[in-house]
Amino acid sequence: MDSVGVLMTCPMLDYLEEQLGKRFKLFKLWNHSSLSEFMRANSNSIRAVVGNTQIGADANMIDSLPELEIVSSYSVGLDKIDLKKCKEKGIRVTNTPDVLTDDVADLAIGLALAVFRRISEGDRFVKNGLWKKTDLELGTKFSGKAVGIIGLGRIGSAVAKRAVAFGCPVNYYSRTEKPDTGYKYYSSVLDLASNSEILIVACALTEETYHIVNRQVIDVLGPKGIIINVGRGPHIDEPELVSALVEGRLAGAGFDVFENEPEVPEQLFGLENVVLLPHVGSDTVETSMAMADLVIGNLEAHFLKKPLLTPVI
Ligand SMILES: O=CC(=O)O
């Protein structure tokens, strides 16, 4: 397979780069300053693209690669891939589900705890020597709070399971009610928010879920409410969320994702009740390796004409 051209769109994991380099003819897009020159010279050799949450395969890229057969994404999210175009052109698509579910769900609960119990704030407080002068303000209990989950897929269900272990009643919104969950279903996000004390966004980003958390949702969650986002930045109307936090119309928030990563609204930097992470939901050693192995396994399966491990298309 070492003559098969595989294009990586941006740096991901050293292990993935090494392993792809051992098996395929690897092209690294970020090493080329002129995209058009790169495409002119190499587009006919590239049969696979490996993208991620930053750079996937948009319509432009797909159209520039006439020999493209497969997009193997180093992510579970597919929002950076033009799926419609892939379908039209018969290009296969794979992602990395399941292996990252636990990590993302762990992080959602971690962010909730960090916000409710002031963990990041307390860390800054101690490191800045403030403990000698005063006490950290009281936190808020997390156990038992009504948790509202947007999206009860793999990750949302794993978040729900963890929330139950904290004694939290679980509510959820999804397009359709899931049978036999034991959780309370709401067919509107607005109703979910008005019946929850913490809202956790865990759904896929699609046209329907863009800005699924808007001003109205924020307002019904109210000044005691907390929002956690481990989905995608564009799930939330970010300027509205920032205003709500700055004006005290929300109690706090924890974000792993933002609308224009790696840009983060600077108004959030001074807010102690907001915990910010650089999109690291699946970034553990164990999970990153497992994701890389899936990316490679899907490519190998495709070029050996075997069934894909985790096909999307
Ligand atoms: O955000 C992470 C992913 O989609 O894998």
Image: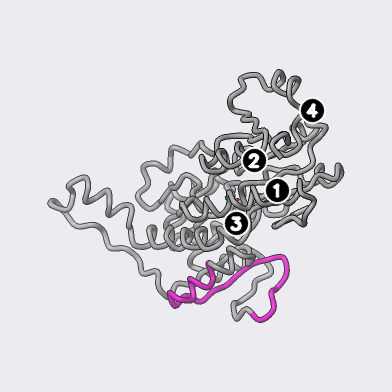
The residue nearer to you, when weighing 310 against 269, is: 310
Mark with earlier residue (1, 2): 2
Labels 3 and 1 touching (C-beta < 8 A): no
**Magenta segment:** 159-180
Using the numbered discs, state the Cα–Cα distance from disc 3 to disc 1 in whole angstroms: 47 Å
Identify the element where label 4 is drawn: helix
Sequence-wise first label, 3 or 2: 2
| Amino acid type shown at disc 3 | Gln
Q: Is mark 2 within 8 Å of ligand 1?
A: no
Please tell me how many numbered marks the rendered image carries: 4
Say which amino acid is labelled 4: Asn
Disc number for residue 23:
2
Residue visible at 50% across and 59% down in the picture: 103
What residue lies at 44% left-to-right and 78% top-to-bottom?
Answer: 167
Nearer to us of marks 3 and 2 is: 2
Q: Disc 4 vs disc 1: which is toward the camera?
A: 1
244 with respect to 154 (left or right): left
Residue carrying label 3? 216
- Looking at the rendered structure, the secondary structure element under dot 1 is helix
- Sequence-wise, which precedes: disc 2 or disc 4? 2
**Residue 174 lies in the magenta-colored region:** yes
Three-letter code, disc 2: Arg
Query: What is the number of the mark on residue 300?
Result: 1
